[in-house]
Amino acid sequence: MARVPLYKTAETEMIRRITSGEWSVGLRLPNEFELADAFGVSQGTMRRALITLENMGLLHRKPGRGTEVCAATPAPSTAALPGAGLHDASGLAPVFEVYRTHSTTRSADSTELALFGTPRLASLERLLRRNGVRVALEDVAIPEAVIPALDEDANPDLARLLQDAGLAFARIDDHVTAAVTTMSQSVALACDRHTALLVLTRTARDATGTAIARQRLRLVADDLVYGP
């Protein structure tokens, strides 16, 4: 098995400390030299890990003020495009293509039951590529009463997917968190285990605020940023 890069090991441990609450929001972290020493890595390795977590929205770095833990959930976005808020260094939104797909109907879990208020869902699970590389795991859920089945070739753009299915929506709310890959996710994405993921959950709502669809993207996003 391939050796996990040191910067990935540092990322994973820092993500764990933040998401578990061990490092609370607002905590000011030691400087790069001290962090590198504490994690047993070089300053360059630590800087790379810090930049990744900043891009994921977990840290805020400001010259002269150090690095602070910030909320892992930026303010919700109601942008109409699927990649809105998600972009690369040049400001361009990523373009995804469908690689593998599976459409089915299933029972809602407790969280989905609370969100949609219905026990049966049309579900779509897909593996997405970007520039020919597997980069994202997607799952889409819509109440079965709203749509009986989801097209396996539906556009990865949630807004386009809904429009193509004839479903009207008033807004799409974004929620961003971080995670690391499980063994099965690492295999699907062809990456090292415990690779850092940006998790983008998008919820489409109608004019009354009722949820009509949810899309979750688990992204290997080393070169992507979520934000304005």
Image (cartoon, rainbow, N blue to C red):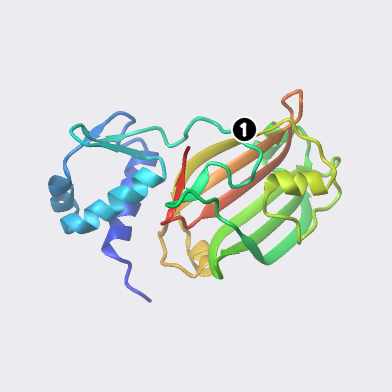
14 w.r.t. 127: above or below: above
Indicate the quadrant containing the N terminus: top left, top right, bottom left or bottom right.
bottom left
Q: Going by the image, does 52 lie left or right of 172? A: left
At which x and y percent is residue 223?
42, 56
Q: Is residue 15 visible?
A: no
Crowding at dot 1, Cα within 10 Å, few <14 / some 14-19 / many 20+, comes out as some
Residue pictured at 64% horizontal, 63% vertical: 97
At which x and y percent is residue 49?
29, 53
Q: Going by the image, does 72 lie left or right of 103? A: left
Q: Quadrant of residue 203?
A: top right
Q: Quadrant of residue 147?
A: top right
Q: Going by the image, does 70 lie left or right of 202? A: left
At which x and y percent is residue 127?
62, 63
Residue pictured at 65% horizontal, 52% vertical: 139
Q: Is residue 78 visible?
A: yes
225 w.r.t. 192: above or below: above
Q: How many marks?
A: 1
Q: Secondary structure at mark 1?
A: loop
Give the residue furthest to the bottom.
1
Residue type, mark 1 in image = Thr
Q: Going by the image, does 162 lie left or right of 180? A: right
- In the picture of the structure, the residue carrying the numbered disc 1 is 78
12 w.r.t. 23: above or below: below
Of 168 and 209, the residue lying toward us? 168
Q: Quadrant of residue 6?
A: bottom left
Give the residue furthest to the front.
90
